[in-house]
Structure formats: C-alpha cells, structure tokens
Image (cartoon, rainbow, N blue to C red):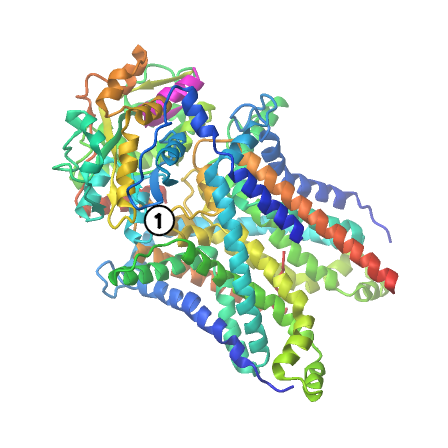
C-alpha cells in the first residue's frame, strides 16, 4: 500500500522554515551596513571587525572554553570512577546513589543555579569572616559546571559497563592480572566510547549553559552566553549577529567534519569485512 | 578534532591581539592618552560595574594604556539589581556607579568604602553645587559621574497635539505604543508626579493611588524595559517613552522624527556617582580609575559620546553645544526637577510588593 | 564477578552531597525562614498573591507543550517512515540550530515578531493587516515552542524507530489498514517517547525566564522571572525566592511522576 508522501514533505518543509528562519535572519543581518535589525540597507563586514575588537566577547569566549574543558575533564574523571564504583555495588545502594545523580538532571536549571548560589554565598560569607578574600567567580563557576556535568558522564558510561561481558574481567584476574591492571587493560578500552561521549556532552553542556552560570559567577568572570545575554538587553549591535553567524558556521563545519569522518570509518570497516 | 581545537585556540589568541582600535579612535577625535601614569596601586586589574550604554568604552582601553591596569567592565540594568548583586556578597567589584538615592541606601547599609580623596585630585573640579550632596552628607563616599534629567521622548509624526504632561503616557489612543521603565522608583515616580505628589512621598495612600493609575495603564504599555528603550524608539517600534535627556539627544540625532519634552508636572533630576563597594580588593586602583575618568580628556570624550550632563567645571566650560543641546542637557530652570531620595525600609518594601503586583 | 571497587564512587558521592543535596536543603531552609531567621510559613502565604504568575507559567508551558506535540509527533512519524539517509540528515537539521546558543535564537525572534519586524513587513507587503505579537504571551509561547520543539521530536522519533518492523508488518498482514495499524500498534508503542517528550518540553518551559524577558517585554512575568527578581533582580528577597523555587520543584516532580505513571518505559536520556 503506497500513500502520498506529499503531506509529510510539506510538514518537514514547514518545520525546517520555522527552525531556520531565525538563524537565517541572524546571518543576513550580520552583513547589514545599518544598525537596524529589520531593515537591510547594504552589505558590510564591519560588524565582524568590531566583534574581534570587542575585548569583552573575546575574553568571555576564552573563559567559556577554559571552563568547558576543565569542567568536562574533572566531571569525566569523577563520573567515570563513579560509574565503575556504582557498577560494582549491589543493586540497592546503587539505586540509592544513582538517584543523587538525577537531582541536577531533573531540576530546572534555574533552581540548580539559585541553590548553588546560596551555598556559595554561605561559604563566601564564612571565609570572609575568617579574613579570607573570597567571592563568586572562576572557582564557583567551575564547581557549578562540574556539578551539572557529572550526571551526563555517568549516564553515558554506565550503559557501556552494563554491556561488558562479565567474564573478561575475571578471566584477566585468573590470568594473573592485578585488579588495577585488569581494570585498565580490560574494562577501560571497552567503556572508552562511553567516556569520550560523556566528556563531549559535558563540554557542550558547559559551553551552552547560561542559567546556572548566571547565578554562580560574580565579577566580570563572564562566559560567552552571559555576555550574549547582556548584549541582548542593550542597544542593538549587529556584532551579536556576527557572533551568531560565526558560531553557526563553526558548529556546521564541526558536524560536517564528524559526519565525513564517521562515513569514512564506516567505509573502512566495510572494506575490512 | 585535536587539530581543529588548536586552530581555534590559535585564532582566538591572534584576535585577542588587536585592540589598537580604541586608542586610535580617541586620537582621531583629538584626545591625547599617550602619557603614562605610574601604577603605584599594587593592583593589576580593576573591576568596574556601570549602567548599560553609559560610557565611551574606548576609555577603558585608554586607562589600560595609560596605567597598565586592566579594566574588567560589566554593566547592570537598574539600581535595584545592582544592590541585589552587592548584598548577596558574592561579587567583588571595585568601582560601581549607582544613582543618588541608591548611594544613600548603600551608605546606610554600610556597603560602601570611604574614598581616599588624596588619590582623586580631580575631584576639585566637580561643580560646587554637586559636592556634598544630600545622598552623601559630608561627601565621603562618592564622586559624581554624570547628572541628568528625565523627560518624554516621542515620535512627533505619530503623537498628535503638544506633549507637555506625563498624562500622554496614559492616553488610550497610544495603546501598545508606550514604553515604560523596568524599575519601581522611575515608574512609580511618573504616576506620583501626574497625581501631583512628591517622588519621595512616604504616604502609603499616595503610593497606592499611583499603583492604581499604573495598573490601569498597564494594558496600554508595550513593554517595561530599560536600555532597549533606546533602540525601540530609534526604529519606531514604539512612539512614547520616558527616558534620560542625555540619551534623548542621541536618539534624535539618528531619528529626526523624535522630540523630547519635560512634563509640566515636574520630573526627576539624578546624579550618578562613582563609589567603591565595601571590601573592594583594588581600592587604590579604583580611585586611580575614578580620577582618570574625571581628567579632562577622558571626561570630555565621555560626555561627547553620551550626551549626559557633566559635573566637571572645566569640561562644561569647554563644551560647545548648540542651543537645543544646552536646553535639554543643561536646563536653566531646575525648579521643575526633584531628585529621588533614599526611602525608609517599610516604604521600600511597599515599593517592591507593589512593583511585583503591577507586573504579575 | 567479584564486586569490588565501590569506593571509586566516593568522590562522586561527596561531590553530589556537597553540591546538590546541601544546596537543595538550603532552598528548603530559606523557604521556611524569614528575614529575621525565624521559622515561618509567611513566604508561602505571600505566594498566594502570585497565583496569576503561577497560572500564566503553567498555562503557557502547557500550551507550548501541546503545540510541540501537535507539530512534533506527526513529524516524528513521517521521519520514522523515511529512508535512513533522509532521516539522518533530517535529524541533523533538527539538532543543528540547538547548537547555536538559545539566547541568540530567541533574540532573532525579536527581529521577526516586532511591530516593525520582518513578519509584519512581509504581511504588509502582501497587503495583509499587521499583527501585534511582540511583548505578548503569544510571543513567549512561540519562543518556547521554537526552543523546545526538538526535545519533543527526538524522543518520539527514537521510540518509533525502536518499534519492530515485523510487528508493523504483521499487523498489516493481519489486514489492518494504515489508520488501524497506527491506532493499535504505533501509537501505543510510541507513548513512552511522547511522555518523555512532554516532560522535556514542559520542565524548561515552566522555569524559563529568558524567553519571557526577551519576547514578553517584562509584562508576561513567569515563575522564572519571579525567582530571578528575588535573587539578582529588582526586589531582593532570597527567602521568597526560595519558596517559589520549592513550589516550582514540586510542580516539576508532580508532572514527572504523572508522566512516569502513565509511561512504563525505561528511563532514557536522549543525548544530543
């Protein structure tokens, strides 16, 4: 039985227009010679030039990358260890401890942010009463990002552990490997895809986060999304469009690169078979 | 993947290198920042928190070039949001620029540091009548940054009849075309004046009457916003808004249909001033920054870009404005204007709850 | 397998207790105390005044979720029947915008929806009356649907793809026409995806403050705005803010419990 595909295609096209119209608008108006967001007056690259002179944007981009890399690394280490630890536990304690993991995932970001902010401020007040200089900033931001990143690492490593053959580890032990060596040689390689995936998700979550950063950072330690937020609340500057365009192009390029690489891998595998 | 990351990082470092533009622009306008000031402060950075759209930001680069102290610059939207940031205690700004009544409150709450005026010799140039203000008795905490007045900015082609009263913001003919401020003091102030009351009334009935008026106005209002008013008026998104005189001049420059009027019921005169929050880590550098911003070239470059009114005598004397600009930025008759004063705790709470009540 | 190595979870447990359990307890503590530090339920009494905001938040989130479902479900169904190549590129296209920061995407809607914006320019160019959308609840709802639609499409699609082809074919062989097969087989089997889609759209919609801030002009106050105002905004009151947060958390938990109750499907994290 064949049915017309036309309605489906129309729906796809409509959704595509809906999803891409704003992005198209951002891109087109990044080349607008006028400051207006809605009237195209002529072509210019000036906004790109002034974007790259904008110290605030550049240092925010740098900070965003640093925080994302660091928090992803720390979260990956803690999360992977936790996944292995949880995996070796009995069902009941495992379930209980895993529910901890759900808190940051389930909670709306704004609540995670507000709650962490209150904790940090309490600590800061305490430290200051001891005469230590302290404030919201890089450290608190990093703590916050690690906190919301850990669950994603665990959630991507645990399934890989579950897929492990239960016997390989024991076989390694029987062959005289120390438990540590058995972990490193047998388990690690098996769960590596999960670990990398977790690290990458953590990196992305961190780069993209606005809400939690907004509440947990203080003075001028601003990530890129925070700078974007303050830009949207001021007078219009098409620099913001230029920034969006660059981000979009970067993401597009990365995705295409990843897909091409994957396709190539696939081909190699097929050839080997 | 690794390569891409390295390339991206290299690109960023490369781009971070180019920041000569700011100094060049200032130089082209005839301002000289080729001198140096020895950094005796022991700080390498200063954290500044200012209103949005309220500084010629090239000057931060100039300060960095002159002193070698890095400026971290960040902006806030309202006095109240600034205070929230300060009392959570998490932030550590070195220089902030609140308005008069908020400075009064921050002093009362012990959130400010006393200034060392020997580090700010340019304070001598502040106009005498702006020294020792009511919000800072004895002038121990603040150095005026800019002052100005509030009026109505409107589109002459789409608003009929003369605009000389706050009442026009409550006119149903302009439904959906009116913008209002996104903070309680400014917005309630407008209603209070229209009703013939003082900005600083502590009479709860008067505040409630103002609330009633604003609640009736709400359906006419397109948005409650701050800095975005600028843009929305310029492109004609809205046709009526209260705004600051200094910015009104800039808006009129880019949209010839706009005009500015001070309502006959009276309006707000404000002073925004540099202060240093309690416990600032870079206090000496902050004072150096304040002094720099009050130096002739910096203050002149600033006031020419902003259109607000300068508190500095020699900058004012050297200004060359046209008649309209003088009339708007430096009105001769100040009797129409009233400043906001710090309010007692229970009135502030009433403001807070009425404000949320209005917006909810 | 010998169960050893539980200690490896130690740092995780310590970290999570410090940075999620204790902060949550702080929220509860602040919610039940006043400015003087005394125990009180007064914060919650004040919440009654904000019924309108609660109603608006829940209402807008519900509308957005419904719209996402109305668009997302048919789309997922259509995509699940496409060839793998088409489907893969379609999924990529759906996910791609999500990689651009949501603030930027929402900001773009301002240009489209404004009175003098692109949509109205288009309408008046073809001789239609212009619309007043910006700074209304409608604009906020559009923003929500735009931002969270992929959260509906992807889980539904994932579940639909898992439905065994043979099951569908068997149903068809047994004489079911397309509508019956859909009603009897595909729809029930896709429910878990729908339910997780609903939570994934509803939760961020009910807690956002960005979308209402950018597209609602400060007039359509949502719960997120209310919380933000108490901590970093115009009215500082962390006690009130905590009590609103607590109620919001309860709303979220209830909605998730409801969804879990209807859906027996296993927990699945959709990784973007």
Is residue B252 a member of the stretch shown in magenta?
yes
Secondary structure under the numbered disc 1 in the rendered image: loop
Q: Name which quarter of the figure residue A166 lies in.
A: bottom right
Position in image of residue C87 (x %, y %): 75, 51
Res B268 → quadrant:
top left
Q: Nearer the viewer, residue B237 or B106?
A: B106
Q: Viewed as shown, does residue B196 lie left or right of B25?
A: left
* Residue A254, above or below B37: below
Q: Is residue B214 left or right of residue A209?
A: left
Which chain is disc 1 placed on? C
Judged left or right of residue B339, residue C259 is right
Read off the magenta span. B238-256
| Quarter where residue B354 is shown | top left
Residue at horizontal 43%, vertical 66%?
C20
Q: Does the magenta stretch include residue A124?
A: no
Residue B185 % position (x, y): 26, 37
Residue C216 in sight in this render:
no
In the rendered view of the protein, which quadrant contains the N terminus of chain A? bottom right
Q: In this view, does B268 lie to the left or right of C163?
A: left
Q: Identify residue for label 1.
A: C232
Q: Where is residue B82? Give x, y as percent.
A: 31, 43
Tell me the quadrant of the picture where the C terminus of chain A can be found: bottom right
Q: Is residue C110 visible?
A: yes
Q: How many marks?
A: 1
Closer to us: A22 or B170: A22
Q: In this view, does B300 lie above or below B280?
A: above
Asked whether B47 or B309 is in front, the reply is B47
Note whether A72 is above or below B360 in the view shown.
below
Image position, residue A38 (x, y; %): 55, 27
Q: Is residue B256 above or below residue C257?
A: above
Q: How crowded is mark 1: few (under 14 residues within 10 Å), some or many (20 or more)?
A: many
């Amino acid at each position: 039985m064949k049915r017309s595909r036309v309605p489906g295609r129309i729906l796809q096209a409509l959704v595509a227009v809906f999803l891409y119209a704003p992005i198209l608008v951002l891109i087109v108006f990044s080349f607008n010679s006028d400051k207006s967001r809605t009237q195209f007056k002529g072509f210019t690259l000036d906004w790109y030039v002034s974007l790259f002179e904008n110290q605030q944007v550049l240092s925010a981009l740098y900070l965003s990358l640093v925080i994302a890399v660091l928090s992803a690394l720390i979260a990956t280490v803690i999360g992977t260890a936790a996944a292995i630890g949880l995996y070796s536990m009995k069902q009941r304690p495992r379930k209980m401890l895993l529910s901890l993991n759900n808190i940051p995932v389930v909670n709306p970001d704004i609540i995670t942010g507000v709650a962490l902010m209150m904790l940090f401020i309490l600590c800061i007040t305490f430290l200051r009463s001891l005469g230590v200089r302290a404030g919201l900033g890089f450290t608190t931001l990093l703590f916050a990002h690690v906190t919301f990143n850990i669950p994603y690492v665990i959630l991507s490593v645990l399934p890989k552990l579950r897929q492990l053959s239960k016997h390989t580890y024991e076989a390694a032990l029987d062959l005289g490997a120390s438990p540590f060596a058995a972990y490193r040689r047998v388990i690690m390689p098996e769960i590596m895809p999960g670990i990398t995936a977790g690290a990458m998700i953590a990196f992305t979550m961190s780069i993209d986060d606005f809400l939690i950063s907004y509440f947990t950072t203080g003075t001028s330690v601003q990530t890129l999304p925070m700078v974007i937020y303050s830009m949207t609340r001021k007078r219009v500057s098409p620099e913001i469009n230029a920034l969006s365009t660059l981000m979009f192009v970067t993401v597009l390029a990365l995705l295409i690169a990843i897909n091409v690489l994957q396709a190539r891998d696939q081909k190699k595998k097929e050839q080997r078979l | 993947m690794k390569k891409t990351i390295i390339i991206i990082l290299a690109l960023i470092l490369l781009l971070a290198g180019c920041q000569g533009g700011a100094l060049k622009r200032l130089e082209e306008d005839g301002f000289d920042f080729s001198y140096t000031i020895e950094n005796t402060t022991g700080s390498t950075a200063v954290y500044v928190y200012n209103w949005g759209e309220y500084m010629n930001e090239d000057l931060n680069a100039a300060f960095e070039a002159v002193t070698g102290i890095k400026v971290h610059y960040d902006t806030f939207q309202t006095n109240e949001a600034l205070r929230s940031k300060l009392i959570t205690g998490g932030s550590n700004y070195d220089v902030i620029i609140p308005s008069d009544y908020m400075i009064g409150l921050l002093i009362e709450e012990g959130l400010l540091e006393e200034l060392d005026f020997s580090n700010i010799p340019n304070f001598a140039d502040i106009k005498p009548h702006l020294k020792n203000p009511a919000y800072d008795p004895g002038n121990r905490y603040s150095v005026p940054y800019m002052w100005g007045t509030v009026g109505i900015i409107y589109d002459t082609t789409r608003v009929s009849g003369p605009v000389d009263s706050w009442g026009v913001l409550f006119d149903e003919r302009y439904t959906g075309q009116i913008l209002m401020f996104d903070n309680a003091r400014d917005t309630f102030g407008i209603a209070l004046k229209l009703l013939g009351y003082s900005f600083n009334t502590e009479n709860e009935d008067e505040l409630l009457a103002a609330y009633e008026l604003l609640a009736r106005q709400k359906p006419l209002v397109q948005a409650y916003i701050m800095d975005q008013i600028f843009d929305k008026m310029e492109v004609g998104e809205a046709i009526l808004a209260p705004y600051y005189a200094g910015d009104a001049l800039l808006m009129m420059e880019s949209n010839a249909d706009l005009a500015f009027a001070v309502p006959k019921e009276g309006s707000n005169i404000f002073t925004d001033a540099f202060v240093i929050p309690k416990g600032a880590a870079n206090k000496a550098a902050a004072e150096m920054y304040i002094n720099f911003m009050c130096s002739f070239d910096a203050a002149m470059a600033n006031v020419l870009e902003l259109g607000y009114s300068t508190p500095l005598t020699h900058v004012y004397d050297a200004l060359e404005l046209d008649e309209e600009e003088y009339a708007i930025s430096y009105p001769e008759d100040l009797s129409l204007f009233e400043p906001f004063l710090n309010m007692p705790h229970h009135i502030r709470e009433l403001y807070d709850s009425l404000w949320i009540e209005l917006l909810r | 397998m010998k169960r050893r190595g539980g200690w490896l979870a130690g740092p995780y447990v310590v970290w999570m207790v410090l940075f999620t359990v204790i902060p949550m307890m702080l929220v509860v503590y602040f919610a039940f105390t006043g400015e003087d530090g005394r125990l009180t339920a007064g914060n919650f009494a004040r919440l009654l005044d904000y019924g309108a905001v609660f109603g608006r938040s829940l209402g807008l989130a519900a509308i957005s979720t419904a719209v996402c479902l109305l668009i997302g479900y048919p789309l997922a169904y259509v995509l699940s029947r496409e060839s793998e190549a088409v489907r893969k590129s379609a999924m990529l296209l759906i996910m791609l915008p999500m990689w651009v920061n949501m603030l930027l995407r929402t900001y773009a809607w301002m240009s489209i929806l404004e009175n003098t914006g692109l949509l109205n320019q288009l309408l008046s160019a073809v001789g239609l009356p212009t619309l007043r959308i910006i700074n209304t609840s409608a604009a906020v709802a559009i923003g929500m649907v735009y931002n969270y639609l992929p959260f509906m499409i992807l889980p539904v699609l994932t579940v639909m793809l898992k439905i065994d082809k043979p099951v569908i074919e068997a149903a068809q062989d047994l004489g079911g026409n397309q509508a019956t097969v859909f009603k009897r087989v595909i729809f029930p089997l896709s429910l878990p995806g729908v339910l997780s889609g609903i939570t994934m759209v509803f939760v961020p919609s009910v807690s956002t403050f960005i979308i209402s801030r950018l597209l609602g002009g400060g007039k359509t106050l949502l719960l997120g705005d209310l919380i933000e105002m108490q901590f970093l905004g115009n009215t500082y009151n962390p006690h009130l803010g905590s009590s609103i947060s607590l109620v919001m958390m309860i709303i979220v938990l209830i909605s998730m419990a409801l969804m879990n109750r209807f859906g027996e499907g296993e927990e699945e994290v959709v990784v973007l």
